């Protein structure tokens, strides 16, 4: 009887580890993947706000559904939004080192996040 409980417990642990690993690898947090909130509609709305350099519209999109990503606290002016847009363009071009320099300049991605799981695109 004790063996059955041990086997069931082991299976449970393995299952939990497998689910946890899958959830973690779904979003690696690096600059080559989309965040968990990505949709084509949202991406288009973000692109339009960036194209128009509209800080308020961009912030509204970024904070919809109760999300509060750190990026909306950091990027607060038209100048900062233009730098953020430049960073995104560099990332799309595969120029990750240049994009990371701008992230650092803006105060993003430098270990000062709150670690509360909110992600940005």
Image (cartoon, rainbow, N blue to C red):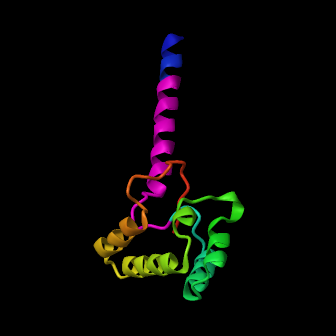
Q: Nearer the viewer, residue 97 or 102?
A: 102
Q: Is residue 113 magenta?
A: no
Residue at (40% x, 60% y) in the render? 109
Residue at (42% x, 57% y) in the render? 28
Q: Is residue 42 above or below residue 108?
A: below
Q: Is residue 59 above or below residue 48?
A: above
Image x and y of residue 51, in percent: 55, 88
Residue at (54% x, 11% y) in the render? 1
Q: Nearer the viewer, residue 34 or 109?
A: 109
Write down the region rendered in magenta. 8-34
Image x and y of residue 34, in percent: 49, 67
Q: Nearer the viewer, residue 41 or 108?
A: 108
Horizontal relation, residue 19 to residue 95: left or right: right
Q: Residue furthest left?
A: 97
Horizontal relation, residue 45 to residue 23: left or right: right
Image x and y of residue 114, in percent: 50, 49
Res 60 → quadrant: bottom right
Q: Nearer the viewer, residue 35 or 19?
A: 35
Residue at (35% x, 73% y) in the render? 99
Horizontal relation, residue 104 to residue 49: left or right: left
Q: Residue furthest right?
A: 65
Image x and y of residue 22, in percent: 47, 50
């Amino acid at each position: 009887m004790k063996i059955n409980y041990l086997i069931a417990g082991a299976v449970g642990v393995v299952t939990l580890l497998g689910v946890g690993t899958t959830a973690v690898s779904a979003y690696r947090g690096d600059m080559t993947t989309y965040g968990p909130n990505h949709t084509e509609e949202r991406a288009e709305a973000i692109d339009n706000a960036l194209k128009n350099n509209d800080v308020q519209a961009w912030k509204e999109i970024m904070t919809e559904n109760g999300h509060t990503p750190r990026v909306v606290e950091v990027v607060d002016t038209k100048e900062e939004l233009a730098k953020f847009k430049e960073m995104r363009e560099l990332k799309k071009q595969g120029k990750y080192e240049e994009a990371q320099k701008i992230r650092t300049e803006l105060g993003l991605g430098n270990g000062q996040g709150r670690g509360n799981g909110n992600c940005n695109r």
